[in-house]
Image: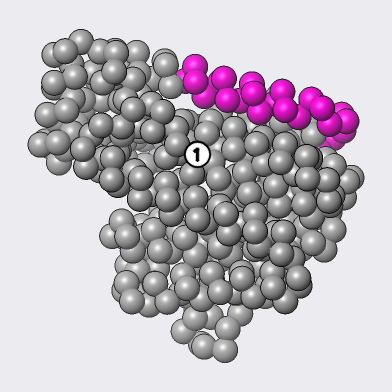
Amino acid sequence: MVSVNEIKESVSDEMKVFEKKFKEAMVSEAPLLNKITHYIIKRKGKQMRPMFVFLTAKMLHGQVEEKTYRAASLIELLHTATLVHDDVVDDANERRGFFSVNALWKNKIAVLVGDYLLSQGLLMSVESKEFQLLKIVSEAVKEMSEGELLQIEKSRKLDITEEVYFEVIRKKTASLIASCCAAGAASVTEDETTVATLKKFGELVGLAFQIKDDIFDYGDSEAIGKPTGNDIREQKMTLPLIYVLNNGTIEDKRTLINIVKNHNENKVKVKEAMNIVIKSGGIQYAHAKMLEYRKEAIQLLQQFPDNEPKRILIGLVDYTVNREK
């Protein structure tokens, strides 16, 4: 089993160079923008996205190229833009334990900051003539928007089937990790089949990643480090819940729908809903599905030569399904 420290260490040199380049890509002539982008950089998360970019490139090519750094920066710029906009849409005051941009500087400024980051990503790819990278990442942003809108539309009616759920998370979450792996590959090879294979690999990892997040919402809030039951409060139709609505008893279905629709602000009722989902096998089912996607993803990598970056990349996949928060 590859440790988190091994994963980080394997791309530590690339990450140092990337952080410097990413910071430079965010610089603006507007002092307020610089203040806000500095705050955004300071609250960085696990930085799994650039890790996928670098490890994919190194697995194929043995090393990263200047184009690989541009790929990682482009993805991070566009992804950060979507996060800033998401916090406005969700009226969220926190992200990763820090105040959100909109909480500190209000919605109008947050939307403008997101627009600025988006335009910086577009300019970077156009100025360096990286049109394939721009296409890969733009497709991901398009799919993320479609996935979010599909989820909003379906959540209102509480009629999400498993098929629709997977379509939502494929677009909303998996498309981003897919674009990381496709962009990493495209930065070191022009072979379209290789790029497509690694895009599919990233998509499968992204599906597993999202199911893991679904499972977390039914766990111990102290162990995870954030409140649980949020998905029910926000009327999000996650895989454990969908499974029980499709396979549980009539009484359990009725109770769950009533709680999600009418009592999602009631802590006691939300806890009752969580217990029904756990008791009815929703978590076990989701966990099994997650492991299926992990297995498919790793099988796709078997066609590539064995090397250290490939071993670490498989370790990163295992981390996404075994992480504890």
Q: Is residue 16 above or below residue 262?
A: below
Please indicate, yes or no, whether residue 12 appears anywhere in the rendered image. Answer: no
Residue 191 lies, in percent from the top left, at: 83, 45
Residue 278 lies, in percent from the top left, at: 31, 18
Quadrant hosting residue 233 = top left
Q: Is residue 55 magenta?
A: no
Kindly give the residue lying farthest to the front in the view shown: 192
Badge 1 marks a residue whose secondary structure is: helix
Question: Callout 1, which amino acid?
Answer: Arg
Tell me if mark 1 has few (under 14), some (14-19) or many (20+) residues whose alpha carbon lies within 10 angstroms of its own: many
Q: Residue at x 50, y 55 (%)?
A: 142
54 horizontally vs 268: left or right: right
Quadrant hosting residue 269 = top left
Please name whichever residue, 95 or 245, is drawn nearer the observer in this view of the structure: 245
Q: Bounds of the magenta span?
A: 287-309
Please name whichever residue, 211 or 134, is drawn nearer the observer in this view of the structure: 134
Q: Residue at x 32, y 72 (%)?
A: 107
Residue 279 lies, in percent from the top left, at: 28, 13
Secondary structure mostly seen in the magenta stretch: helix
Kindly give the residue lying farthest to the top in the view shown: 249
Q: Which residue is mark 1?
A: 170
